[in-house]
Image: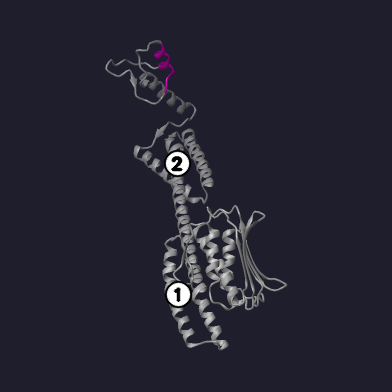
Amino acid sequence: MIVGGIDPYFPRFLPAAASSSLIFEESEVNSLVPRVGIVGLELEAHSVSQIIDSVVDNRPLIYTLPSITESLLIVLSGLLGIVISISFSSSAKSAVALIVFTIIGSSIVYLCMIYFGLWLPVTPMAVCLPLAGIAYLGFNYRSQRSAIRSQQEQLVEAQILEAERRKAIERAFSAIHAGPLQRLSSLLRNAKDGNIKQGHVIGELEALNKEIRGVGERLRQEAIGDVYFFYSEGDIKLDLTHSMHEVLYEVYSLAVQRKLPGFEGVKVRAVSIEPFNCKQLSLDIKRQLCWFLEESLQNIGKHAIGATRIQVSGKYINEFYSLKIEDNGPGIQSSHLGEGTQSFYRLEALLYGKFARFSRPSGGTVCELSWPSSFNTS
């Protein structure tokens, strides 16, 4: 029994976190009595009960740490959560470790209360540790994602620059190979055969000088996305926005007019290029198609000495469009793959098509490029 007096100036309820079923019942009976703490008498009863249990049952008295120590525990628990998150390589392992350490920390708090009477705050271990660890994991995840995204963007940019560099090299090669090198090759052949005159040499060198000077302008126009294909000889440019079968026919007409030894004996020239879907082809691929036809015809003029027939055809075959250039000359004389043929194979890869160059048993060379009619560069 607790005996004592009542101080009328002492507050009825003391601000405490402990609950009381007595006050709860009283609040239900008389709603004018608010529930704001614990009754002083009940607080004294708890104190007496702890003293009795300490004497009779050897139960330790409950004591707490200083406020500054509890604040330090909160900070250390947050740091421990961050350290745990850093210590593991994957987020899944870090999350499991945070759960395990939270359980261990809560168990330590409970054991300190039971066996030593030390009241440790539950918040550091139950809230601060996992919350700080999860917050760090989230921040680290975002940082890693940002780093990965930045690396991917740099890789894509490097790939784009590499592709542009490769295109620039191919453009330079095609511009030089289709014009100046062809003329220089013809001039050297005539010089070796002894069939050369000073006036002819001067005229060829002047034309060669003009073609070489025009290469720079051609490359500059193509690099800025011009819609024209610059023919290798003369100041001729073809509009690539027109129907491609018409553009290819113009390329054919210009190519066979060149004064090359393979064209001197040609009596039959057959050309039939059917219209095809070119809306999905990029300007770069259109230029390469023009250069493919031009280069193939110039190869005939340079190597097919004695040919009497040239046939160019473009038509659909089993959902593929086939562009074929044929002659009845001596056929392929060398197995060496020149830069021109290698560029044809690169064009084959761009079109997801097929390139073939072979000699006929009866004589002559066939150069064919085919690609799916449903090809889409986007």
Q: Main secondary structure of the magenta part?
A: helix
Give the structural element (helix, strand or loop) at label 2.
Answer: helix
Please identify the quarter of the rendering in which residue 341 is found: bottom right
In this rendering, the answer to whether 233 lies above or below 378 is below
Q: Residue at x 45, y 75 (%)?
A: 211
Which residue was labeled with disc 2?
129
Measured Cα–Cα span from mark 1 to mark 2: 76 Å
Is residue 347 in sight in this rendering?
A: yes
What numbered label is drawn on residue 41? none
Q: Is residue 321 above or below residue 295?
A: above
Q: Residues within 10 Å of mark 1 (few under 14, many from 20)?
A: many
Q: Is residue 20 magenta?
A: yes
- Neighbourhood count class around disc 2 (C-alpha, 10 Å): few under 14, some 14–19, many 20 upward: many
Three-letter amino acid code at the position of disc 2:
Leu
For the N terminus, the image quarter is top left
Q: Is residue 359 above or below residue 47?
A: below
Question: Residue extending furthest left?
Answer: 9
**Residue 318 vs residue 334, the one in the foreground:** 318
- Residue 245 placed where, x, y %? 55, 59
Position in image of residue 337 (x %, y %): 61, 73
Q: Which mark is residue 211?
A: 1
